[in-house]
Image: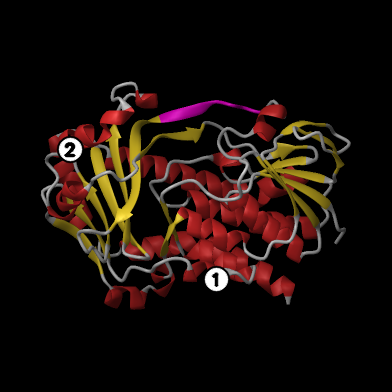
């Protein structure tokens, strides 16, 4: 395997995981990140077993798990407070793959992923130009010569833009408010609560915190609701939510709410020439399967494996390894979101009734996770 000099653009989950894997394989890695301080901005996130097994293959899985929290139970509820689905620890024994799911405060996860990385890093910097010969210009004036450029810089990737690849971003039709705050209702299980055209997710975190996401059909870009009136808007919007979701809404005080429209890349792109795309830069997807970050991590592992074969066309080799899996998950996530956002009361009644009749859904989840786990095990075996 030829050792390469590799520039990774983006220090998020995809970029940090790629840097960890590539340095372990002996490549020289240089990180470029547009923010001036090394860290993460965001609320909460859940990683499932395919992501965590991939991190195990890098030797950092236990450290990452230690930064998070594994809730013992989970379920789906109707906005009335009636329980539709319940998963408990006893059920998880039959599906141990599914039980390896951890919830994180994003900055804690970011710190765990970055720990131990000893690479040259340019903060507050962007890639302003690169060419087919690997010559790269950075906004801080640095000129570099590299063998490979990795665009891990998110849905609005500058690397993707400079490659003149498809830039179309689709709005899913719904927006999301996120918050991490004190767990004032003492919730110990992960819950998703379904209403008509809206839903609430509640995820316990470490240090008696809770991550909440509140999703509703809305015009994009906050056009319909001023940001400074978010609590009033949410109180009115989710007024019919009872049970744990209703109790949570009553506890919101001066906690910092973040609003993000739910967008996805229209087209999956893997790069061209000496520039390859991973994570949201390649295939940003809706979050309805909780697989966006996991697929970014799988991309990073797959890229390390691909480079061991010294391919002449790295983007094409990564596409061959990843495109079918990513495309399937991206499509399924969009479909799940459409069902979860149904408005029609009859359709919602049918949806909720079907949810009660799906005791085998853990097996479906387990089947979905296994390809990523198999990939990680292959990577780890090659490292031995």
Residue that appears at 23% across and 45% down: 253
Q: Which mark is residue 63?
A: 1
Answer with left or right where residue 290 lies relative to residue 29.
left
The percent coordinates of residue 119 (x first, y second) are 75, 57
Q: Which mark is residue 235?
A: 2
The percent coordinates of residue 181 (x first, y second) are 31, 53
Magenta-tinted stretch: 165-171
Q: Please say if the residues under marks 1 and 2 sit with CB atoms less than 8 Å apart.
A: no
Answer with left or right where residue 156 lies relative to residue 98.
right
Quarter of the picture containing the N terminus is: bottom right
Q: Which mark is residue 234?
A: none
Q: Earlier in the sequence, mark 1 or mark 2?
A: 1
Look at the image and tell me whether residue 370 can be seen: no
Q: CA distance from mark 1 to mark 2?
A: 38 Å
Identify which residue, 85 or 254, lies in the foreground: 254
Answer with left or right where residue 304 lies relative to residue 182.
right
The percent coordinates of residue 331 (x first, y second) are 45, 42
């Amino acid at each position: 395997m030829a050792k390469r000099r590799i520039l990774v653009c983006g220090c998020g989950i995809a970029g940090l995981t790629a840097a960890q894997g590539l340095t372990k394989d002996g490549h020289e890695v240089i990180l470029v990140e547009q923010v001036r301080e090394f860290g993460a901005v965001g609320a909460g996130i859940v990683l499932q077993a395919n992501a965590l097994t991939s991190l195990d293959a890098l030797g950092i899985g236990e450290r990452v798990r230690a930064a998070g929290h594994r809730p013992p139970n989970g379920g789906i509820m109707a906005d009335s407070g009636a329980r539709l689905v319940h998963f408990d620890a006893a059920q998880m024994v039959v599906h141990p793959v599914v039980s390896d799911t951890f919830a994180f405060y994003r900055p804690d996860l970011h710190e765990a992923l970055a720990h131990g990385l000893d690479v040259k890093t340019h903060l507050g910097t962007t890639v302003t130009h690169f060419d087919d010969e690997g010559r790269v210009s950075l906004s801080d004036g640095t000129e570099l010569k590299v063998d490979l450029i990795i665009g891990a810089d998110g849905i609005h990737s500058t690397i993707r833009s400079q490659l003149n690849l498809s830039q179309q971003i689709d709005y899913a039709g719904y927006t999301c408010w996120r918050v991490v705050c004190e767990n004032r209702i003492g919730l110990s299980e992960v819950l998703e609560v379904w209403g008509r055209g809206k839903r609430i997710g509640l995820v316990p975190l470490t240090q008696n915190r809770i991550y909440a996401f509140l999703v509703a059909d809305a015009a994009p870009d906050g056009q319909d609701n001023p940001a400074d009136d978010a609590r009033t808007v949410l109180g009115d919007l989710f007024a019919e939510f009872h049970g744990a979701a209703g109790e949570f809404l009553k506890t919101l005080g001066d906690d910092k709410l973040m609003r993000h429209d739910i967008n996805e890349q229209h087209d999956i792109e893997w790069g061209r020439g000496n520039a390859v795309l991973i994570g949201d830069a390649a295939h940003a997807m809706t979050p309805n399967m909780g697989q966006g970050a996991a697929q970014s991590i799988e991309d990073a592992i797959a890229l390390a494996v691909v480079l061991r074969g010294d391919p002449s066309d790295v983007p094409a080799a990564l596409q061959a390894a990843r495109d079918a899996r990513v495309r399937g998950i991206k499509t399924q996530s969009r479909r799940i979101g459409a069902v979860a956002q149904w408005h029609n009361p009859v359709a919602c009644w049918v949806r909720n009734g079907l949810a009660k009749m799906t005791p085998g859904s853990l097996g479906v989840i387990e089947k979905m996770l296994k390809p990523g786990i198999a990939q990680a095990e292959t990577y780890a075996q090659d490292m031995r």
